Image (cartoon, rainbow, N blue to C red):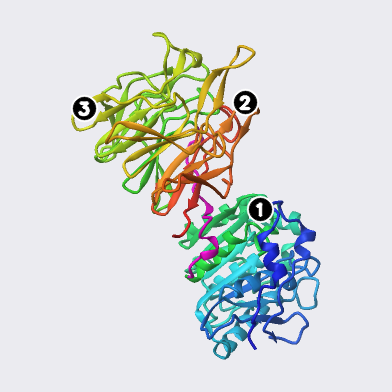
């Protein structure tokens, strides 16, 4: 008998009306889902069974093996709560093998029982597959918390030494792993496992003996790499049981060993949001599972998702990065420590997820705009000096990647910083920002917002004045769509009722057409965000983050996408790390966000590189 209705109306309603508040343990324990198609025992103990959920239809069906968490004990729920996810997956045409197993507080549980249970459960799955139309060529193991440790261990079963009690010849191959807040690395995370779950390694890995001196050699997933697996480490940004650091550290070890691993961040999600089909995070989780199976990720198609890549070498903000030949370049920036700014340059290689330090700028700069033309990168203007003693410059520096060398280019007609730049057809456009208001300008207040635009014809080395923008502003962001420049957000220095000068955010979106030298005003951002970052993809404008000084000081996590055809903005999943003064660069189907400040002002500069996977078409 197959399931004819896998998600009852109550569950569907819960998905649609789920609260954005992070899920707590009591809500997780109350999760329920549909009954399984069948309950099948793989051993004589009460906990040695699995639940099979078969979707409607003829099959063959891809398979998700679910392994629940609960700190390796029976105290914190388990297979019953996982029916919530199982039902949602089956409704998407994915067969589910929901595994129960003996835990440390059950007879025969812990080491070696729970590992032997994984073997037996997968052996039974293999034997049942033909009967139920299950396609074991498309299989993913999904585990939560303690279950994350077990599914990551499953991926390495072929590397278990033949002398181990856990050895199995020719185990079922499961090399696609989704670990939801997993506590997988027993060797490196023993202290965290003790503090989060009150578990000792002897319970999870056994005691050393003369024949088994290293108890982690056959129980620790990280010791069983490389194994040819690909792992998605999915973690809520608010997960305190398995914090983001755990996922990043494991991913780094997997990559160093030669396996593939990706960190996926669920914004505003707790440890329990990671597993609930009723959570706002579910579309992202479902998207990962379907990606692992090679399925079209329709549930996540309208949202996109966040992940984390390698941190940059230098923590900096007020940067304007650019891309050239598969690499992302950052130059200069504001530092949180003395001397307050830098000449450092580095490049991120997207293919290898690595950073490389390059020749520094001829002089230290921050708010220096970068633009690529004809295989070279142009660094335009920028400030020198530590806040508030800033001086804008008109110099243009040109970087040749083949020589790793900077040279001087044609100076701008006017000193300028905090403006935007864009490269189109061999020309570089510089618009807005701040320019000196006095000849000896050496302080932030000695500069004024400008609406001026200029264009450099790189091949002739000449500058030309453009039509002024409708708005004078600084700290805006811009991107090119169909050879037009979209300038969004930013701020203006305005006089307040008490006579003071304050930087006030603006939400304005203005579009410049180089073909006509004319401007057009379009729908404003839903929020006025200054110091934001922007990029374009697929004919749409994406804007992220920023900061605000008045009426209250705050850093934004909000992201937005603008559709020019509709003249309309829509919300994106919020940034995992709220920040401002960061940069955004599109590479392929992803937008890379790097650097920036995590608090208002020139403090808490960041090295983080977070990646937004763009929604599927």
Q: For mark 3, give the secondary structure.
A: loop
Query: What is the crowding at mark 3: few (fewer than 14 residues within 10 Å), some, or many (at least 20)?
Result: few
User: What predominant SS class does the magenta segment belong to?
Assistant: loop
Give the quadrant of the N terminus.
Answer: bottom right
Q: Is residue 33 above or below residue 531?
A: below
Measured from the top left, where is residue 518 in percent x and y? Answer: 33, 31
Q: Are marks 1 and 3 in contact (CB under 8 Å)?
A: no
User: Which residue position holds label 1?
Assistant: 269
* Residue 373 seen in render: yes
Q: Is residue 252 above or below residue 58?
A: above
- Checking the image for residue 550, the label placed there is 2
Say whether residue 67 is magenta. Answer: no
Query: What is the crowding at mark 2: few (fewer than 14 residues within 10 Å), some, or many (at least 20)?
Result: few
Q: Earlier in the sequence, mark 2 or mark 3?
A: 3
Question: Which segment did they paint magenta?
Answer: 295-317
Q: Nearest the camera: 156 or 606?
A: 606
User: Which image quadrant for residue 13?
Assistant: bottom right
Measured from the top left, where is residue 388 in percent x and y? Answer: 52, 17
The CA distance from mark 2 to mark 1 is: 29 Å
User: Which image quadrant for residue 513?
Assistant: top left
Disc 2 vs disc 1: which is toward the camera? 2
Q: Nearest the camera: 580 or 68?
A: 580
The CA distance from mark 2 to mark 3 is: 41 Å
Q: Nearest the camera: 309 or 563?
A: 563
> Is 108 left, or right, of 483 in this rendering?
right
User: Which residue position holds label 3?
Assistant: 461
- Checking the image for residue 140, the label placed there is none
Q: Earlier in the sequence, mark 1 or mark 3?
A: 1
Measured from the top left, where is residue 343 in percent x and y? Answer: 41, 28
> Is 198 left, or right, of 384 in this rendering?
right
Q: For mark 2, give the secondary structure.
A: loop
């Amino acid at each position: 008998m197959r399931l004819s209705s896998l998600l009852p109306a109550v569950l569907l309603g819960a998905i649609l009306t789920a609260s954005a508040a992070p899920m707590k343990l009591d809500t997780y324990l109350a999760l329920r889902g549909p009954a399984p198609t069948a309950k099948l025992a793989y051993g004589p103990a009460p906990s040695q069974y699995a639940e099979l959920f078969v979707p409607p239809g003829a099959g063959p069906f891809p398979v998700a093996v679910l392994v629940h968490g609960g700190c390796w004990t029976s105290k914190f729920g388990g297979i019953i709560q996982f029916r919530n996810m199982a039902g949602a997956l089956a409704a998407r045409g994915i067969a589910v093998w929901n595994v129960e197993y003996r835990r440390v507080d059950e007879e025969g549980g812990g080491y070696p029982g729970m590992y032997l249970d994984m073997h037996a459960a997968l052996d039974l799955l293999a034997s049942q597959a033909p009967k139920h139309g299950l396609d074991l060529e498309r299989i993913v193991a999904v585990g939560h918390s303690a279950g994350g440790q077990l599914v990551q261990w499953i991926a390495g079963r072929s590397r278990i030494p033949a002398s181990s009690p856990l050895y199995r010849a020719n185990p079922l191959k499961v090399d696609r792993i989704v670990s939801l807040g997993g506590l997988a690395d027993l060797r490196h995370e023993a202290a965290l496992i003790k503090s989060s779950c009150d578990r000792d390694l002897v319970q999870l890995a056994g005691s050393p003996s003369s024949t088994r001196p290293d108890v982690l050699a056959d129980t620790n997933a990280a010791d069983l790499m490389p194994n040819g697996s690909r792992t998605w480490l999915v973690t809520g940004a608010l997960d305190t049981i398995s914090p983001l650091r755990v996922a990043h550290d494991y991913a780094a070890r997997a990559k160093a060993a030669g396996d593939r691993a990706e960190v996926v961040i669920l914004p505003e999600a707790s440890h329990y949001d990671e597993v609930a089909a009723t959570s706002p995070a579910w579309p992202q989780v479902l998207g990962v599972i379907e990606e692992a199976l090679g399925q079209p990720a329709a549930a996540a198609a309208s949202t996109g998702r966040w992940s984390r890549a390698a941190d940059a070498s230098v923590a900096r903000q007020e940067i304007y990065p650019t891309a050239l030949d598969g690499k992302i370049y950052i130059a200069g920036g504001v530092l949180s420590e003395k001397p307050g700014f830098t000449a450092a340059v580095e490049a991120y290689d997207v293919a290898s997820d690595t950073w490389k330090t390059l020749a520094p700028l001829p002089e230290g700069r921050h708010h220096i705009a970068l633009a690529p033309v004809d295989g070279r990168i142009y660094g335009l203007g920028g400030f020198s000096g530590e806040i508030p003693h800033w001086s804008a410059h008109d110099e243009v520096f040109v970087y040749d990647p083949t020589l790793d060398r900077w040279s001087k280019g044609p100076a701008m007609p006017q000193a300028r910083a905090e403006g935007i730049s864009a490269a189109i057809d061999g020309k570089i456009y510089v618009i807005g920002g701040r320019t000196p208001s006095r000849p000896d300008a050496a302080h932030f207040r000695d500069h004024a917002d400008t609406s001026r635009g200029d264009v450099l014809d790189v091949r002739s080395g000449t500058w030309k004045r453009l039509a002024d923008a409708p708005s004078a502003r600084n700290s805006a962001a811009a991107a090119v769509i169909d050879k037009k420049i979209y300038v969004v957000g930013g701020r203006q220095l305005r006089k307040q009722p008490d006579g003071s000068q304050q930087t006030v955010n603006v939400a304005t979106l203005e579009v410049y057409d180089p073909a006509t030298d004319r401007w057009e005003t379009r729908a404003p951002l839903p929020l006025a965000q200054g110091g934001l970052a922007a990029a374009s993809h697929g004919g749409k404008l994406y804007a992220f983050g920023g900061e605000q000084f008045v009426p209250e000081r705050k850093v934004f996590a909000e992201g937005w996408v603008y559709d020019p055809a509709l003249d309309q903005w829509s919300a994106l999943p919020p940034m995992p790390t709220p920040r401002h003064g960061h940069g955004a660069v599109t590479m392929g189907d992803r937008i890379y966000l790097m650097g920036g400040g995590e608090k208002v002002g020139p403090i808490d500069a960041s090295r983080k590189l977070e990646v937004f996977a763009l929604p599927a078409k």
